[in-house]
Amino acid sequence: MAPALIAADEELRRKIVGINAETVTNVTSTDFPGHYPGEDHSWSLSRFSQDFRVQFHQNAPLDASFSLINIDASIANAFRRILLAEIPTLAIENVYIQSNDSIIADEVLAQRLGQIPLTGSLAGLRWLQYIPRRPQGLLGEDSGKSLEDEREAKDNDTIVLKLQVRCDWKDGMKGKQGEPEELYEHSNVYASDLVYELQGRQSNHFSGENAIRPANPRILIAKIRPGDEIDIIMHAVKGIGADHAKYSPVATASYRLLPTIDIVRPILGDDATKFARCFPKGVIGYEKVTQEESERERSGYEGEVGEKKAVVRDVMRDTVSRECLRHDEFAGKVKLGRIRDHFIFSVESTGQMPSDDLFIESVKVLRAKCRTLKGSLAHIMR
């Protein structure tokens, strides 16, 4: 028997998670073989390629928003977790302090330096080798150690940075009173004071404007006073957020389901104004009841020509607060929900890579995982 055809409105109904005043309904996915008699829900690559869509809403260098449509929650969540913890990123790992006269303790200063986001040539950053860390043993041995700790640093896996700053009195200002910036030279140590030193083949990738540098040069590292000096050599290597948060390439990477607002009975006049105030600005708008609508039997608009009615403008702005469900005048007039396979992603980069490139990198990581799994299964079946 041929698989039964599903009406478009029925297919959409199955995808909507119901948002009620006190409960959430229809939370379980049903698009798998055997749930509906006569319907074929077996996974198909051709069907997925036809239905899956990516829609961008915002694409700024450090902040991207896009939708993944017609994809399973497990895959969408895999992308989110990879963005947070599995994309190799460059950060300061080893700090060699020659002199630190600031009031900040050496270990705290090293921690602050490690948190500074670095950027440079995107091609060069991809050229740098990522050295995985050892798996943690049953009793915690070798925890946190990387293979880099046991071998000599090389030009294709280690970036060398220096910080050499000394604070002195400005000419003619010694003994006077005023703001530190007016009295002293280099009273504030900023990320812009980090100096990158080329090593070997790095000149092919990080020369000139492509040099390794802080993503935000105005990050304050420390404050020093006349006679104080900071002299530090740093080694930056690639790591992943699963090892340490400083290697996470994103400030935030999250998703939410696309909201749905279905006005099933007319909301008119002052009620329309109150209804709009239950949602963020721009979600609900107003229109006038037309002559055609007022003449339609049992439409709810009879005799209301020219009256203001509430209409849905932009569901993307909705936060699903359920405020409208608290008011008796809207009972039975509106249904709220979320579409279970429409994921709205928000990705904010720390500055090392553009936010849209980060998603592409997460796809590459997931593909590599799939290849590894496929190879492991083939090995088992031999």
Image (spheres, rainbow, N blue to C red):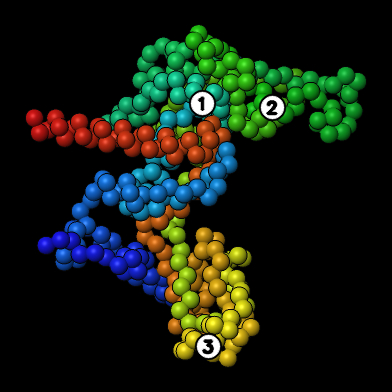
- Circle 3 Cα neighbour tier, 10 Å, few/some/many (<14 / 14–19 / ≥20): some
Name the amino acid type tagged 3. Glu
On the image, which quarter does residue 181 sit in?
top right
Give the labeled residue for mark 3.
295
Horizontal and vertical percent position of residue 257: 43, 58
On the image, which quarter does residue 272 sit in?
bottom right
**Residue 264, relative to residue 100: is it above or below?**
below
Horizontal and vertical percent position of residue 122: 51, 26
* Helix, strand or loop status at disc 2: strand
Q: Residue at x 50, y 21 (%)?
A: 124
Horizontal and vertical percent position of residue 109: 58, 29
Give the labeled residue for mark 2.
189
Q: Earlier in the sequence, mark 1 or mark 2?
A: 1
Q: Earlier in the sequence, mark 1 or mark 3?
A: 1
Residue 111 showing in the rendered view: no
Distance of label 3 from label 2 (alpha carbons)? 74 Å
Distance of label 1 from label 3 (alpha carbons)? 63 Å
**Residue 73, relative to residue 333: is it above or below?**
above
Of badges 3 and 2, nearer the viewer stands: 3
Name the amino acid type tagged 1. Leu
Residue 380 showing in the rendered view: yes
**Residue 306, relative to residue 338: is it above or below?**
below
Of badges 1 and 2, nearer the viewer stands: 1
Give the labeled residue for mark 1.
122
